[in-house]
Image: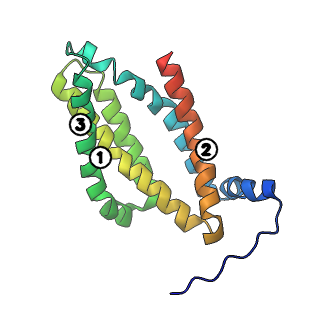
């Protein structure tokens, strides 16, 4: 396959940068993902800072945060192994919703005083993340023309990253 040479862009720089955000705003499924995902990440960011308080609540040393992170990693690998099957049977929208639901259940479980329940909760949290991320990237590719995919990705990264950053900062404060 020979890729055609890139065409020079004639649109103004600001319009080119904003093209991804305009496409997200005009595409209902992308707009819903940006708003819903942004709200969800506004809440999820708090769990990032709680990671360092959980060992204390479980009466474990601070180094136990590594065990908690390991549980999240195991869950993420297991979740990643299931993404293609879930995506094929449920589609991007449902898969992202299911991923958020699994993350929410996992987050609630980390409020327990049992080490086993907290580790299972963190594994669920990790399990849901690949569903959410793969659904997002697949949706960007399916709902955006090829020449806008990078700009749409950047626009959604800002729309989702800003609430997460604010949430982490508030959680740290």
Tell me the quarter of the picture where residue 10 sits. bottom right
> Residue 158 got which mark?
2
> Residue 70 got which mark?
3
Instruction: Give the total number of marks visible in the rendering.
Output: 3
Characterize the local packing of mark 3: few (<14), some (14-19) or many (20 or more) Cα atoms within 10 angstroms. some
Figure check: 159 above or below 65: below
Give coordinates of residue 115: x percent, y percent: 18, 23
Characterize the local packing of mark 2: few (<14), some (14-19) or many (20 or more) Cα atoms within 10 angstroms. some
Dot 2 or dot 3: first in sequence order is 3
Q: CA distance from mark 2 to mark 3?
A: 28 Å
Q: Secondary structure at mark 3?
A: helix
- In the rendered image, which residue does mark 1 sit on? 76
Dot 1 or dot 2: first in sequence order is 1
Give coordinates of residue 17: x percent, y percent: 73, 55
Colour mode? Answer: rainbow
| Residue 35 appearing in the image | no
Contact between marks 1 and 3 (CB within 8 A): the answer is no
Give coordinates of residue 23: x percent, y percent: 69, 59
Dot 1 or dot 3: first in sequence order is 3
Residue visible at 31% across and 34% down in the picture: 106
Residue visible at 60% across and 63% down in the picture: 149
Question: Left or right of 65: which side holds 5?
Answer: right
Q: CA distance from mark 1 to mark 2?
A: 23 Å
Asked whether 142 or 165 is in front, the reply is 165
Tell me the quarter of the picture where residue 54 sits. top left
Characterize the local packing of mark 1: few (<14), some (14-19) or many (20 or more) Cα atoms within 10 angstroms. many
Residue visible at 47% across and 19% down in the picture: 172
Figure check: 38 above or below 64: below
């Amino acid at each position: 396959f020979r890729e055609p040479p890139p065409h020079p862009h004639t649109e103004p720089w600001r319009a080119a940068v904003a093209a991804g955000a305009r496409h997200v705003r005009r595409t209902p499924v992308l707009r819903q993902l940006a708003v819903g995902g942004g709200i969800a990440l506004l809440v999820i960011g708090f769990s990032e800072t709680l990671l360092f308080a959980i060992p204390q609540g479980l009466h474990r040393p601070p180094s136990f945060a590594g065990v908690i992170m390991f549980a999240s990693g195991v869950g993420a690998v297991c979740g990643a192994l299931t993404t293609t099957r879930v995506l094929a049977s449920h589609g991007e929208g449902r898969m992202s919703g299911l991923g958020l639901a699994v993350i929410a259940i996992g987050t609630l479980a980390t409020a327990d005083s049992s080490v086993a329940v907290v580790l299972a909760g963190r594994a669920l949290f990790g399990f849901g993340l690949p569903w959410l991320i793969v659904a997002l990237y697949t949706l960007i590719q399916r709902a955006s023309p090829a020449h806008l995919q990078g700009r749409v990705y950047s626009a959604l990264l800002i729309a989702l990253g800003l609430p997460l950053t604010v949430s982490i900062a508030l959680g740290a404060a």
